[in-house]
Amino acid sequence: MKLLVIGKNSTLGKIYKKKTKIKKIKFISHKDLNKISLKSFDHIVNFAINPKFKYQKYERSLDIDNRIIEKISNNAYFVMISSRFVYFHDNNFPFDEKKKCLPMNFYGKNKLTIEKNLKKKKRNLLILRLGTLLNFDLSKKHLFTSYLLNNLKEKKKVIIDLKKDVFKDFFTDDYFVKNLDFLIKKKIKGTYNLSSGIPINPKLIASKIMKGYGEGKLIFNYKNKLDKSFLLKNNKLTKITKFKLDKKKILTYSYNLGKKLRNA
């Protein structure tokens, strides 16, 4: 197996490089796509996305996945990373892969457009729709754990801009890599939700992180009033991989994030 991972500087790229059990992998930036022959690889994963897709309409010239597809072998196995944002966030959850997608923001709409374009061109295709990732990240990216950990370290407080009754579907970086390794090795094709399938209030995650850290104050400011609860149904994936992530593991992982922050 000749595996190429594109997006080495992305959050998922860094996680995968650190935790994957697959030995022979080449990691590159999407900026280096013209410097390498993609046809020499039979397995390709793309973690990169143009940041403009988060706030503007789809443009083919910005589509990194499309650029890759046009350069790889027809028989190559390709993995696209999608998002929970392709689903319409009403109260009709959990969302399964057969549910009609009606994304409400640019990111979700663009991810769904990329999905549809790839399905027209590629048979050996795996699409993973991700929930909310938990990982140790002190970058300044506005992601759940990076935002939470930075606030706790710098201000000794955690600000949650959600309603108190909102819940999310969290999964850990270890669980993500374990699943991805398995799917790549088995060349599983199709569209799958990758998350825990467990509803957890962000307050509980934050409380466990603060407990591991040893201090901190939890503050709700309800700034993000439009954000709603969500839950991804992951039965389709777990039926194949047999990997399950329970609530206890998620909360223990959160506690250990706090401990790691204390020593950072």
Image: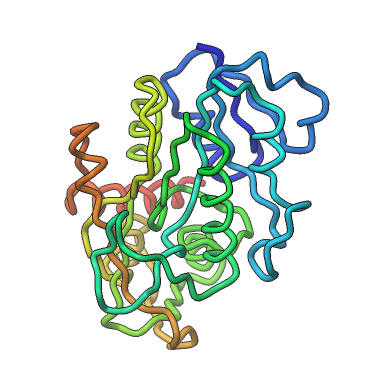
Q: Quadrant of residue 127?
A: top left
Does residue 159 lie above or below 231 as drawn? below
* Residue at the spot 69% in from the left edge and 29% down from the top edge: 28
Q: How is the image coloured?
A: rainbow
Between 114 and 157, the residue placed more toward the observer is: 114
Q: Is residue 198 left or right of residue 137?
A: left
Quadrant of the rendered structure where residue 90 is? bottom left
Tell which residue pokes out farthest to the front in this image: 120
Tell me the residue at 39%/26% (across/down). 181
Residue 109 falls left or right of residue 132: right
Q: Is residue 260 above or below residue 89?
A: above
Q: Residue at x 72, y 39 (%)?
A: 67
Estimate the x, y position of residue 147 in percent, counting from the top left: 53, 65
At a point 67% along the width and 70% down the height, the residue shown is 55
Q: How many marks?
A: 0
Between 93 and 21, the one lying in front of the other is: 93
Task: Name the quadrant containing residue 208.
Answer: bottom left
Where residue 184 appears, as percent x and y from the top left, is 42, 25
Relative to 150, 159 lies left or right: left
- Residue 194: give x, y in percent of width and height: 34, 47
